Amino acid sequence: MKTLQVGIMSREKFQSRTIEIASGRYIPKKNEPKIWFSSIKSLCEVLNENNMRLLKIIDEQKPESIKELAALSKREPGNLSRTLSTMARYGIIEMKKIGKNSKPIAKALDFNIQYSAAG
């Protein structure tokens, strides 16, 4: 399983960076994060203790559905579904459609965080 590279950068700096990349004036290095959060707070909302426990359950117990994961984690399916959607959007998990069910699959358990107070 891979280590996910994540970074923290203000929206303004991220927009400037995106424009630089699109115009060809900046080429991201291989080791630079592909996933960016706009603040430490937003990072902590996604990678909080509850969600890290959830990720561990997904990796170790390999539930076949959101319903099974809800039972294993003792979380409400509606709340859990929103959390999983957010984690999937950031590439932390993958939701694989199997028949009528969506199976959560952990894509990363370790995270390297890039953040500079200087911006």
Image: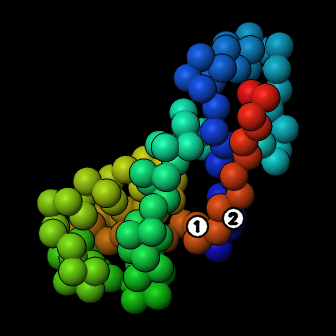
Quadrant occupied by the N terminus? bottom right
Residue 72, x across and y down, in percent = 26, 85
**Residue indicated by mark 2:** 3
Q: Is the residue 63 above or below the residue 29 in the image?
A: below
Query: Would residue 39 appear left or right of 79 to someone viewing this image?
Result: right
Amino acid type, callout 1: Ala
Residue 8, x across and y down, in percent = 63, 39
Amino acid type, callout 2: Thr
Query: Would residue 13 appear left or right of 92 to someone viewing this image?
Result: right
105 or 81, nearer to the observer = 81
Q: Is the residue 8 above or below the residue 17 in the image?
A: below
Quarter of the rendering containing residue 39: top right
**What residue is rendered at 64% in x and 68% in y?**
110
**What residue is rendered at 52% in x and 48% in y?**
43
Mark 1: give few (<14), some (14-19) or many (20+) Cα within 10 Å.
Answer: some
As drawn, the label of residue 99 is: none
Q: Of callouts 2 and 1, which one flags the residue occurring earlier in the amino acid sequence?
A: 2
Q: Tag count in the figure?
A: 2
**What residue is rendered at 72% in x and 42% in y?**
115
Quarter of the rendering containing residue 101: bottom left
Mark 2: give few (<14), some (14-19) or many (20+) Cα within 10 Å.
Answer: few
Residue 28, x across and y down, in percent = 80, 32
As drawn, the label of residue 108 is: 1
